Amino acid sequence: MPEGHTIHALAARLERAFSGRVVAASSPQGRFAADAARLDRQELHGARAHGKHLFVDIGPATLHVHLGLIGSFPVRPAPGGHVPAPLPTVRLRLETDAHYADLRGPMTCTLVDAAREREIVRTLGPDPLRRRQHPDRALQRIANSRKGIGELLMDQSVVAGVGNVYRCEVLHRQAIDPLTPGRDLSTDAWTALWDDLVLLMPLGATFSQILTMPDQVEAARRLRRSGRARSVTESLTGERLGDHFERRFLVYKRTGLDCPRCAATVQDRAVAGRTLYWCPTCQLRH
């Protein structure tokens, strides 16, 4: 399932391609035909992400999309105004003479009003990729829970947008035992986790790949500060992961290999329906 940085990158991509322009909307698959007709020939005003939820304002309506496990929504350029015919599996196509975007396989694709959007957002915890968030809201829920912090980080009502890769990697980066009950996690440990997510997830949105290795994080931060990351971001369609950096992780999918910090063996176990990877030697209770 795409993590929150992917949806924030998608919202920005839709805005770059379509904001302020009238879009043609259609549903080649047919399952969204009536609602697509409401969006057709309307101006796209903007797009935003809340965790893993995407909202797109088109005319008087708001499109709500959750990609789920298999959904995709790439935004591609149309050189010379040539837009290829859509595949019959496309739930929704948005297009102009310069770009087109095909939504396939979403868990949710519907139109919502402002009240329904607020209702959805109220179910979500603070989002590390949004401004003016209140991480103390998450801490309140964590501090009242017997569940392990590795499970709580996957709960979208605790923290919005975090998925399996980020939870494994930030817990290792902060040397926190993922099995630490939430009620036993110190405020300082939670603050360190939140601050690390606020650091890492924007880099993921910029480069369309999760970056957690210290050398890659520093290189990505330099590129962002210099403005040179913009060309990388604008070249990405969302069709596949970015490849500006080599795909490397600290513990994710490294079962049986050496921990990069202490050389002990990385282990795994199922937690919250996904495989958790961690080092039981140097990740400690906080």
Image: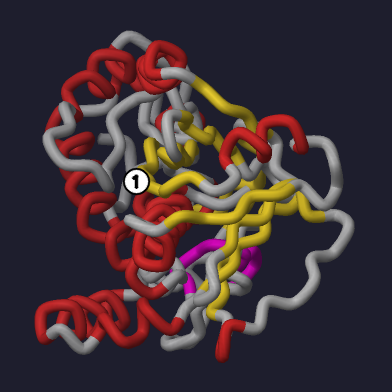
Residue 145 among those drawn in magenta? no
Rendered location of residue 46, percent (x, y): 34, 47
Q: Nearer the viewer, residue 195 or 184?
A: 195
Q: Amino acid at mark 1?
A: His
Magenta part of the chain: 249-257
Can you tell which quarter of the image residue 106 is in?
A: top right
Q: In the rendered image, which residue does mark 1 sit on?
A: 45
Q: Does residue 261 appear in the picture of this structure?
A: no
Res 231 seen here: yes
Task: Identify the residue at horizontal 67%, vertical 39% (top origin).
Answer: 36
Look at 62% across and 64% down and name the residue there.
Answer: 253
Tell me if residue 115 comes above or below residue 88 in the rendering. Answer: above
Magenta region's main secondary structure? loop
Q: Residue at x 38, y 36 (%)?
A: 50
Is residue 36 placed above or below 93 in the rendered structure?
above
Count the labels in the image.
1
